Amino acid sequence: MPGQVHKHHRIARVLADEIRSGVHADGSKLPGEHSLRERFGVSRTTLRQALQALGEEGLIATHAGIGSFVTFDGTPLDHRLGWTRALAQQGTELTTETLRFEEVTDPELAAGLGLASDAFIALDRVRRLPDGHGVSLEHSRVPATGNLAGLPERGLEEGSLSRVLVGAGRITESGEGVVSVRGLDAAEAQTLRRSPGESFLRLTQVYRAADGSVVEQVTSLLDPARFELHVRSGRGGRQ
């Protein structure tokens, strides 16, 4: 039974990543139960537990005799571990500005992550409100290995790095992060069109695949007026 519980959480995470990256678009129907059971090699009970978990997250709606449909609308800015949730008023539109998208070398980061190669895909983006003020500044680093090498020249699929990672088989299985509060330096304030010293949340996260390899490292600066931190714990107490 413990193994079955582990399986349904793993399946839910994989499908959640695919939904949130746009592999399964809002309003589309998920593959049928038989297809999903064959894909993951699990029982009907385990699969239904995974679908129930997705429903509880608000990602799908399941209709008996019809199937499961995606209900995720793509609004959260940082969804992968559920650490943050956008608090912008309903109907507020955010624009995304790409500041940097290129291959770089970063020996210090590679050493910190325990990687043999120091080649990374660097993607820096700022998200703004209609008045131009930035609410988030994200620095994403992806190991430039395998079919991800040369990605900046090929470009992102519909502007989504998450979709590219899923398409390349780089599925996040686990992650860890550190959050703090700090004042913006002059360069950050200029990029975000905010005041130097203004307090922002600083969130550093490392995402790993099932084999423990690094999928992505992200450092984000988030406007605390627009984001909140969610912490979830299970059996075993606090960590």
Image (cartoon, helix red, strand yellow):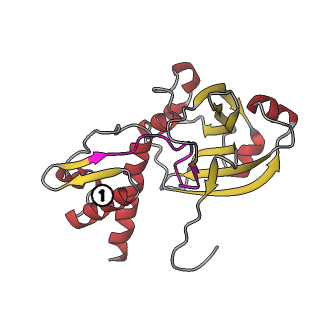
> Hey, which quadrant is residue 153 in on the image?
top right
Residue situated in front as seen by the camera: 195 or 209 = 195
Q: Quadrant of the C terminus?
A: bottom right
**Dominant secondary structure of the residues highlighted in magenta in the image:** loop
Residue 110, given in percent of the width and then of the height, sits at 71, 44
Farthest-out residue, left: 65
Q: Amino acid at mark 1?
A: Leu
Residue 30, given in percent of the width and then of the height, sits at 26, 45
Farthest-out residue, top: 153
Q: Quadrant of the N terminus?
A: bottom left
Q: Is residue 77 magenta?
A: yes
Is residue 153 in view? yes
| Label tally | 1
Q: Mark 1 falls on what kind of element?
A: helix
Residue situated in front as seen by the camera: 203 or 91 = 91
Label 1, residues with CA under 10 Å away: few <14, some 14-19, many ≥20: many
Residue 172, given in percent of the width and then of the height, sits at 49, 50
Residue 65, given in percent of the width and then of the height, sits at 12, 53
Is 160 on the left or on the right of 49, as rendered? right
Q: Is residue 71 magenta?
A: yes
User: In the displayed structure, would residue 78 be above or below residue 177?
Assistant: above
Q: Residue at coordinates 52% horizontally, 22% vertically from top-left?
A: 155
User: In the displayed structure, would residue 172 be above or below residue 144?
Assistant: below
> Hey, which quadrant is residue 95 in on the image?
top right
User: In the displayed structure, would residue 195 be above or below residue 81?
Assistant: above
Q: Which residue is mark 1?
A: 51
- Magenta residues (range): 69-85
Residue situated in front as seen by the camera: 5 or 125 = 125
Q: Residue at coordinates 44% horizontally, 43% vertically from top-left?
A: 20
